[in-house]
Amino acid sequence: MDKFRLFPPEASTSAQQIDWIYFALVALTFLICIIVFVPIISFAIKYRRGSKADRSNPRVESVLIESGWTIVPLLIFIGLFGWGAVVYFHVENPPRDALQVIVVGKQWMWRLQHAEGKQEINELHVPVARAVELTMTSQDVIHSFFVPAFRLHQDVVPGKYTREWFRATRTGEYHIFCSQYCGTQHSAMIGRVVVMEPVDYARWLNTGQPMESIALAGERLFRERGCSGCHSVNSKFHAPLLEGTYRKPVPLETGEMVTVDERYVRDSILLPGKEIAKGYQNIMPSFAGTLSEEEIMQLIAYIKSIGNQTPSNESAPNEQR
Amino acid sequence: MHSTTAAAPFVHEQFDDIEQQRKAAKLGMWIFLATEVLFFGGLFLGYTVYRFTYGHVFVQASRKLDVVIGGTNTAVLLISSLVMAFSVRASQLDQRRRLVGLLLGTAVLGCVFMSLKAVEYHKDYVDHLVPRLGFKWVGADPGNAELFYWIYFAMTGLHAIHVTVGIGILVVLAMLAWRGRFRNGNYNPVEIAGLYWHFVDIVWVFLFPLLYLVGHR
Amino acid sequence: MKTATEIDIQTEGEMPRLHYLNVEIGVKSWLLTTDHKRIGILYLWTILVFFLIASVAAAMMRIELLTPQGDFVTNETYNKLFTIHGVLMVWFFLIPSIPTVLGNFVIPPMIGGVDTGWTFYTPYSTTYANSHVITMAGGVFVAGFSSIITGMNFMTTIHKMRAPGLTWFRLPLFIWSMYATSVILVLATPVLAITLAVMCVERIWGVGVFDPKLGGDPILFQHMFWFYSHPAVYIMILPGMGVISELITCFSRKRIFGYGFVAAASMAIAVLGFLVWGHHMFVSGQSVYAGMVFSILSFLVAIPSAIKVFNWTATLHKGSIYFTTPMLYALGFIGLFTIGGMTGLFLATLAVDVHVHDSYFVIAHFHYIMVGGMVMAFMGGLHYWWPKITGRLYPEFAGKLAAMITFLGFNLTFFPQFILGYLGMPRRYHAYPPEFQLFNVLSTAGASILGVGYLLPLIYFLWSLKFGRVAGPNPWRATGLEWQTPSPPPKHNFEKTPTVTERPYGYSPEEDVDLHLASI
């Protein structure tokens, strides 16, 4: 990790793709520098004051030349834009089979939790050659989760979820930096990613105390915090059932439709009155301030995990579906 | 020919003649108004974003505002703009007494607007609609309702500051007009003050529907 | 062209008896002056003080970064240093430098208003940072008013106060670039003002426009902030481009190549510059599609800059090139600006920006534009118009030496930062992993050379005030209107308003003129 280098280690699939664009840009920069600097130097010598060079009939305009050096760069730029956009699209859209890790940034540390329940601080252990998706939020200011070796970079914003993913290609240890200024100890908000062979990773995951997976933790919270008292078929309150709702559209009182996603679930927990599902009353209390960011993410993971189930009792009122 | 006994048009040293000075001042005012549009624009952008995000609660919150006072104020400002337009005309026609009367008339209408605004702000306070000062909200999502009122006070407050400045300018202009400063085609200051006053009026014409009318069907 | 009589007022080799500097004396006559030339001088002294303070802050940061550990200053001091450096350099030096000093001085005679330590990002600025945020924002707010007024003043002057015969396409390119700058100053600054005002109100009264805890949106702050701050980058570079057009033509004794394209490029930059702010937010969590729109627009805004570089290069063709100090700065500008502009493309490319965002690569890129571009242009312009401003010539040899030291020191300071950035060193780091040390040491070494390059002119400029050779009205045999009046000019610039009958830059490369520089 702490070895002198001229070029950063290339340890993920997207790092390779990004580096190719980088090399192309470096080559273009050299080319443009030659195109500009060679004439400047040669004109400076040839037409230095007092030289015997021919200065008759100097040109001061030419639409043809101007169009040439407008259109050629334009075409090159459009090509570069397209290349960059395609790779960016790839970098921003995680594959479906990715391992899930949740990340909470706070001044000045990273708290991470694997889907299986294992928790880490300022460290992230991952298996090589598997896609890993990070779902991130912050509990105070904006941070940014930056792993140079993976060419991976995403702001971590309070009040919303951002995500990034990578597929490590090489085992080893790599830096994690916070790259968005977040206060005095900004430069101390660092950590490391440990990329391991799958066997080692499995062993690492199973050491220590037995763990409760994120979704199970969410289910426990769902019971302990009283959510299940209302959101269940036996409830005496009229509250929507949450099985099978995740990723599905739901009509609101206002007549709009929203998709049940992380944002909607989060807002429904913290600002229950904001978007009331059609046919329900605004009777749910807000849980703002009583749940930590991790707990909210665990609850979301639970709702996600029951996203393919149907409510256990078919006689339940369900205007939602 | 202009009479030479009255105050001759005053040309500042950097200008060649009165015409250049007049054009420069007018253009300067237009540019200033462009900066004002952008200045208010920031708040309009904030309004738009949160109206989009929290549309429902904004509609609820908007219903609590007093449309009658708001509507009356709209009428008052529109009339004041008309009076201002007459003042500019009077200054161009060199009608001194009329000019003084019309400028003061515009200022009085401005004061009526501010008084109604003060009554309305007081009413908002009594109704617990002022953020951070005894704000109370029954209904969904009090936080975002408070955000609406915050934007409401920021926008109307900034507008009120502009109206107050405008009234001050009008009073000073009326005093100068009384002394005959705008005679003999020297009406430039009245003209650019008119531009400013119309701008303030137009801002309100946008504020009124956005803040008062969104909740009414 | 009837110019001889105006010039003849000044006898060769002697200072004019009465000029703007001595027509009135005393502190009051300076502080209350309405003479644009005196205002320019006042600005020069003011920004010089800010430049020195900000440079000291930079020097202290570079010393801190010599070693990986944070040992020279505490992290809190370090954060203050980069904030001071950023805020002062951007709002109190770069933005005012060419517009207020050279602009105020020469616009009327010619034609007859950051990256900072963004401690400003919400919710950090509204809830977590210490109370200096409000002071800082207040300072920027006041400076912003100055920017708006400056922009309004320039636009009005250029529109309505041109000399007879000076049509739009006879304007010097410096004026075109200042016009484009003014458009940005006038339209962008108010947005910054309202954003900072809302931020302060939010901080004081705790209402949540930008704070997510209160229902606000911190990304909205970034949008409003960058809507100002990206165009502000062009406020900092456009005037520099204008100066370069003046210098390149004068010292290659030739008309500019493609006048219309260079002028139009300035306006295109001003317009497109308003549409690219989102490229600062590719990793902020904004939508992928918004990112794509901002990316392609950012590529487009590079085109007019490229056109300018190509046209300046073509201007040298069949010219008669004089290697004076201003020309050395101008050629240095083209080189550094080309590198700065090309590395901007790295940042406009979405996928690459994901990696280099907020790293030292960004620092290196914008210093190539701001320091390599704008400061080089400012120094070039200051040397070029120094004889006009003071009536005396600076020592040419020392000038050339300083220009070359600056160029070398600059590259040594900032080129290693490109490598550091791609390696992944984040910006605003007070301490860093040891593998980054070598490039940081190189950078600090370069900064010390750069410091010499800036101190040298300070010394010889002061020296020249008393001992410099008398310049005469037009030491460069330049064609601009400002050279048709004595140096220093009288209070009202021209005894009588000159009339313009032809396009600018009427130089002839075949005529050999003696600039008397060998003897300085």
Image: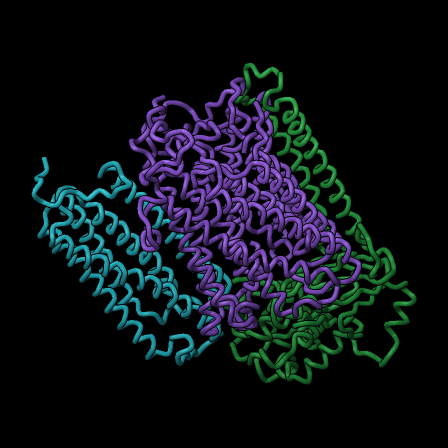
Q: Between residues A233 and B93, which one lies in front from this camera angle?
A: B93
Q: Residue at x 81, y 54 (%)?
A: A12
Q: Which residue is drawn at 54% across and 48% down?
A: C458
Q: Which residue is drawn at 40% across and 33% down?
A: C14
Quadrant housing residue A41: top right
Rendered location of residue B208, percent (x, y):
33, 61
Q: In this picture, is B75 found above or below A200?
A: above
Rendered location of residue A232, percent (x, y):
65, 80
* Side (left or right) of A118 relative to B200: right
* Side (left or right) of A250 relative to B48: right
Q: Between residues C340 and C94, which one lies in front from this camera angle?
A: C94
Quarter of the picture containing the N terminus of chain B is top left
* Side (left or right) of A17 relative to C25: right
Rendered location of residue A113, percent (x, y):
76, 72
Q: In this picture, is C290 found above or below C392?
A: below
Q: In this picture, is C342 found above or below C75?
A: above
Rendered location of residue A283, percent (x, y):
53, 80
Q: Which chain is green?
A: A
Q: Which chain is cyan?
A: B
